[in-house]
Image (spheres, rainbow, N blue to C red):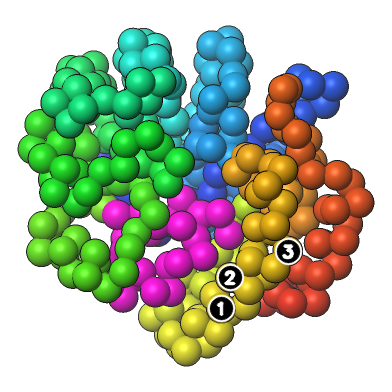
Amino acid sequence: MTNLERPNGVWGTILLPIKNNEIDWLAFEEQVNILCDSDVYGVYTNGTAAECHNQTENEFDKLSEIVSTIAVKKNKKFQLGISHTNARISRERAKRIKHLKPNGCQITLPDWWPPTLEESKNFIMGMQEVVDDMYMILYNPPHAKVLLSLDEILFLTKEAPNLVGIKCAGGDESWYQKRRELFHDFSVFVPGHTVVFGKPLGANGSYSNVACLSPNGAVMIWNLIDIDIEKAKNIENKINNFMKIHILPLASRLSNTGLDKLLASVGGWGPISEEVLWPYEGATFKEVQKIKTIAKQELPELFDV
C-alpha cells in the first residue's frame, strides 16, 4: 500500500483555457503555474469544471504530463482525474498516468448506464487492480446517475484499500454524524461553499468551487474556521447569497462547467475565459463583466488575499 499522505484541505481545479474551440496550451501552462504558486493544498485535473467529459485521449495525456511536470517542479501536490463514462478507458488512463506519480487519481462510477452496487464494486475492484500505489478518490457529484449512500461507500472501501476518499455533496448534521461513526481513516471532500458548516462536523477538505473564484480566498476561509468561525460563517453566507442571486439563475442555460468557468473569469486570477468546448455554451462577456463588479462589491474578502 502507498505511503503517500492522505488528501485533505482545499484543492484547486485546473481549468481549460479555450481559444477557437481548442485548448490554448500556452495559457494552460500559465494557469497551472499560477495555481501551483497559490495557497491551495494541491491541484487536480479533469473534474466537471475542467471538462473531463469532453476531452480527446491525446488532450488527456498532454495535460496530465504538463500538470505533473509543473507540480513536481514547484513541489505542489497534484491529483489526476481519469473519469470516463467508459470504465475500460478509465482503466487505461490509470495505467498511462502511473509513471507520473500523482498524489492520487480521481474516478467516477461509469454511468452511461447506471451501475448496480455489485457493478460498482466490480468497477472499484477493477481499478484497484491497476492503480498500484496510487490513491483513489471517488467523485460522486449530485448529477451522477448513481448517488451513493454512506453505507454503500463503506461497502466499496472494503473492496479497495486504495480508495481513501470521496468527493460528494455532503449532507446535514445526521449525515455527518453517520460519517463520523462509519469512517475513521477516510477523507470526505465537500463543495467549497459548504466547508464552514462541514469542517467542524467531519469534512476533511474541498475540491472547491469557491477556489474557481478565488484560490487563495477559498484557503483563507478554510483556515479561518479554526480561528474565527463566526466570521467564517458570515463570509460563507455572503458567498451562498451571491451564488443564489447571481450564479444559479444561469444554470437554466449553462452547465456546471460553464458556471465554474464563469466564476474563474470573474475571479480573474489566471488566463481563463468563460468559453467552454463545443458543443456547450459558456457565459457571455457581458455577463462576466456584470458579475465581476458585483462580486468585488459583495465578496471583498475573496479578492483581498
Mark 2 — residue?
Answer: 240
* Picture layout, residue 273 above or below residue 183: above
Which image quarter: residue 245?
Answer: bottom right
Q: Judging from the image, what secondary structure is the residue with disc 1 in?
A: helix
* Picture layout, residue 164 above or below residue 41: above
Mark 3 — residue?
Answer: 246
Task: Judge the density around disc 2: few (<14), some (14-19), many (≥20) Cα neighbours within 10 Å.
Answer: some
Q: Residue sitting at 64 percent across and 64 percent down?
A: 243
Mark 1 — residue?
Answer: 237
Q: Residue sitting at 17 percent across and 31 percent down?
A: 117
Real-space Cα separation, disc 2 to disc 3, in angstroms: 10 Å
Residue 86: mark:
none
Identity, as a three-letter code, of the amino acid under mark 3: His
Out of 214 and 21, give the one closest to the viewer.
21
Q: Residue sitting at 83 percent across and 53 percent down?
A: 288
Is residue 198 highlighted in magenta?
yes
